[in-house]
Image (cartoon, rainbow, N blue to C red):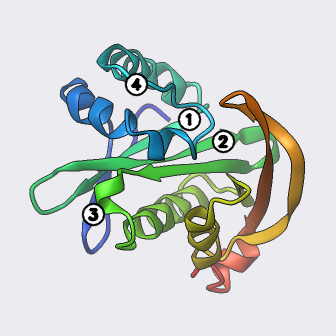
Amino acid sequence: MDDLPTLTTDRLTLNRFRLDDVPRLAELCDDWEIAKTTLHLPHPYARDDGHAWIQNHQDAIQRGAACPFAVRLTKGGELMGCVGLHPHARHRRAELGYWVGVPFWGQGYCTEAARAVIDFGFATLDLHAVTCGHFAGNHASQRVMAKLGITHEGTRRQNVFRHDRHIDLAVGTLLRSEWEAGGGG
């Protein structure tokens, strides 16, 4: 894939990150409430982190290694988060990752955006499965996965080392057949 398409939902527009997103990206990602629930975001998060991350997107997209969508409110275009897929072409699966800024929590935006990206993965990338995980105790992410129809498969005990401690990782999968049957929420 050479580039990401623009995806739309009732309230959101999902498209590529732009370098002019860096100030807002850094503002949202620098919040400890976001950093403590994600595997890869540094904390503190500086503008240089956002700039470097966005600059690496084109290569990752072209290699088929990542599909990072900026999540924006359609009305006004405000950047509010990220939903992405990390495809594994050989196995026709992808790992789903997501976060939305704290001001947007509890309004269904993350589920709405993730559903659009999952639809893109199955319909456009011809995936067989979408996998996802969250840190144990992250009940908001657990609810998002459930609303998306992702079946909880288990917990990998002390699977990741983050913020100076080992953390359990709850994992699940949504199969193409479940998505086709409408099990994706």
Q: What crowding class fits label 3: few (fewer than 14 Cα within 10 Å), some (14-19), or many (20 or more)?
A: many
Mark 3: which amino acid?
Answer: Leu
Is residue 6 visible in this depiction of the protein?
A: no
Quarter of image, res 129 = bottom right
Q: Nearer the viewer, mark 1 or mark 4?
A: 4
Mark 1: which amino acid?
Answer: Ala
Marks 1 and 4 sit apart, C-alpha to C-alpha, by 21 Å
Q: What crowding class fits label 1: few (fewer than 14 Cα within 10 Å), some (14-19), or many (20 or more)?
A: many
Mark 4: which amino acid?
Answer: Tyr
Which mark is on residue 87? 2
First in sequence, mark 4 or 2: give its number: 4
**Is 154 on the left-hand or right-hand side of 167?**
right
- Asked if disc 2 and disc 1 are in contact, CB closer than 8 Å, the reply is yes
Marks 3 and 4 sit apart, C-alpha to C-alpha, by 25 Å
Residue 48 position within the rendered picture, expressed as x and y whole percent measured from the top left = 34, 13
**Is 7 on the left-hand or right-hand side of 153?**
left
Name the residue beneath numbered marker 1. 66
Name the residue beneath numbered marker 3. 12
85 over 181 or under it: above or below: above
